């Protein structure tokens, strides 16, 4: 029978009970019937069409960062997401030199990532034992990479800090004060951990990302210690969550569609395309938050100034006006055309668009490709150890755990 609920009721039902739910029918209905909807649980206007979300991300004159409110990235303090104009361009360029420059990507970062993939991958238990790929591979690889790039050592609490900070950021749209307080505690503990390293780099900088931040100057002044700490907390979280969750989503759907896994076995060069496709098909970050700087009309709806917007890039990535057969998971979809999607010009919105396109996107690309290549080379096939793990989360979405049985290749 047809759904008698309104578009907003349909979407709010998903927000209320999202574990294992499929949001894409609701996204499709919203794109077709009401592309701009007020969602009371989110206290935000929800955008679902590719064109509207892209405009929201590219138009920095009319849309900006949402600061100092629960459920936003301001948990990190003032970092790159909260900057604009010349300050953003110049400070982002420092990060880009290390995270996107061919000199580092093709040598130092490649060596770090490949080493971590093999280090953790070789420790995974194989059939008939059960391996949790999230805690055993997809999370420690990007965590280890960002820690090495910042020369922060192997702090035993990195994983807990990361999880608590992320949970208190944009994921905390319900504004749970307990979750927020726990995130602030984790952030402060991370700040305490990194402060001695900042002091050391001030006097004796090295050749790594933390030294870059400590040496960075803008308008003749170096970043303050508070700014370096904010950058550090942001990079630790942003440098992990996309790769971790995207790989979890990718492995899940390769198990659900074994013919796609076999395509990769037959042609491992499709690993890059497969990584890009999962970022489109099941993006780990489902929505990006912005604020209107003035009254704005979006798809016929007037949104008042200083209102919160949530652009659901998960919906944009399934917009049939932009992608053919968007509901089909195809590891060869982007063959030969992967790289633009890790820059502002590509159609996949997983890393945003405009000047705030994720600076670390090429690092995530490398981590995903090397991990997938390792799995395809080493294992004949993978299977779930138990039931199919459900996807959870509204802003960040993936299986919480990924218990699988790994069958080694002959």
Image (cartoon, rainbow, N blue to C red):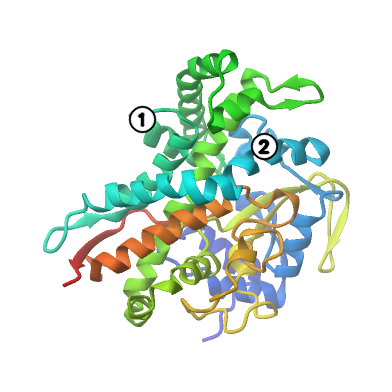
From where the camera sits, is residue 123 visible? yes
Of labels 1 and 2, the one closer to you: 2
- Of the pair 387 and 145, the residue shown nearer to us: 145
Q: Where is residue 343 in the image (x, y as percent from the top left)?
A: 66, 59
Vertical relation: 145 (above or below) 373: above
> Where is mark 2, residue-wise?
94
- Of the pair 132 and 33, the residue shown nearer to us: 132
Determine the secondary structure under disc 2.
helix
- Whichever of callouts 1 and 2 sits on the residue coming sooner in the sequence is 2
Left or right: 393 as drawn, with respect to 209? left
- Of the pair 76 and 103, the residue shown nearer to us: 103
Q: Where is residue 136 in the image (x, y as percent from the top left)?
A: 28, 49
> Where is mark 1, residue-wise?
154
Left or right: 49 as drawn, with respect to 249? right
Vertical relation: 336 (above or below) 55: below
Residue in view at x 69 percent, y 23 percent? 223
Vertical relation: 148 (above or below) 245: above
Assess disc 2: are there few (<14), some (14-19) or many (≥20) residues with their C-alpha within 10 Å of its C-alpha: some
Left or right: 127 as drawn, with respect to 313? left
Residue in view at x 51 percent, y 27 percent? 184
Left or right: 284 as drawn, with respect to 79? left
Assess disc 1: are there few (<14), some (14-19) or many (≥20) residues with their C-alpha within 10 Å of its C-alpha: few
Estimate the spatial distance between the alpha carbons at disc 1 and disc 2, rounded to whole Å: 24 Å
Q: Position of residue 265 (x, y in %)?
A: 32, 76
Q: Position of residue 160 (x, y in %)?
A: 38, 34
Query: In which quarter of the view is residue 270 placed?
Result: bottom left
Residue in view at x 54 percent, y 55 percent? 285
Give yes or no for contact between labels 1 and 2 (Cβ–Cβ under 8 Å).
no
């Amino acid at each position: 029978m047809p759904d008698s609920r309104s578009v907003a009721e349909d979407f709010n039902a998903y927000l209320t009970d999202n574990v294992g739910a499929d949001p894409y029918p609701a996204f499709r209905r919203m794109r077709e019937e009401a592309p701009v909807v007020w969602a009371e649980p989110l206290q935000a206007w929800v955008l679902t069409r590719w064109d509207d979300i892209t405009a929201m991300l590219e138009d920095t004159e009319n849309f900006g960062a949402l600061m100092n409110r629960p459920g936003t990235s301001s948990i990190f303090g003032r970092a790159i997401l909260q900057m604009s104009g010349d300050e953003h361009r110049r400070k982002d360029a420092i990060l880009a030199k290390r995270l996107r420059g061919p000199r580092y990507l093709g040598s130092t970062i490649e060596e770090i990532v490949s080493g971590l993939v093999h280090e953790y991958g070789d420790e995974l238990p194989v059939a008939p034992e059960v391996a949790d790929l999230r805690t055993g591979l997809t999370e420690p690889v990007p965590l280890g990479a960002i820690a090495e790039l910042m020369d922060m050592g192997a702090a035993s609490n990195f994983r807990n800090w990361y999880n608590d900070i992320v949970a208190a950021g944009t994921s905390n749209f319900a504004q749970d004060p307990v979750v927020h307080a726990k995130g602030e505690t984790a952030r402060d503990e991370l700040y305490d951990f990194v402060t001695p390293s900042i002091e050391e780099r001030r006097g004796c900088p090295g050749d790594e990302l933390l030294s870059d931040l400590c040496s960075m100057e803008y308008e003749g002044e170096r970043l303050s210690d508070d700014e370096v700490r904010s950058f550090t907390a942001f990079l630790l979280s942003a440098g992990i969550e996309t790769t971790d969750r995207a790989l979890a989503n990718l492995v899940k759907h390769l198990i659900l569609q074994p013919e796609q896994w076999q395509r990769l076995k037959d042609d491992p060069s499709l690993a890059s395309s497969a990584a890009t496709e999962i970022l489109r098909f099941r993006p780990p970050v489902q929505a990006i938050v912005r604020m209107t700087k003035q009254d704005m009309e979006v798809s016929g709806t007037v949104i008042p100034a200083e209102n919160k917007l949530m652009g659901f890039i998960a919906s944009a990535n399934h917009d049939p006006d932009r992608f053919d057969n968007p509901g089909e998971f195809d590891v060869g979809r982007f063959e030969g055309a992967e790289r633009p999607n890790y820059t502002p010009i590509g159609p996949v919105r997983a890393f945003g668009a405009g000047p705030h396109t994720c600076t670390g996107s090429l690092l995530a690309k490398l981590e995903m490709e090397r991990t997938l290549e390792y799995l395809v080379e080493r294992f004949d096939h993978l299977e779930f150890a138990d039931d199919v793990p459900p996807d959870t989360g509204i802003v960040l979405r993936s299986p919480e755990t990924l218990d699988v049985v790994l069958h080694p290749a002959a």
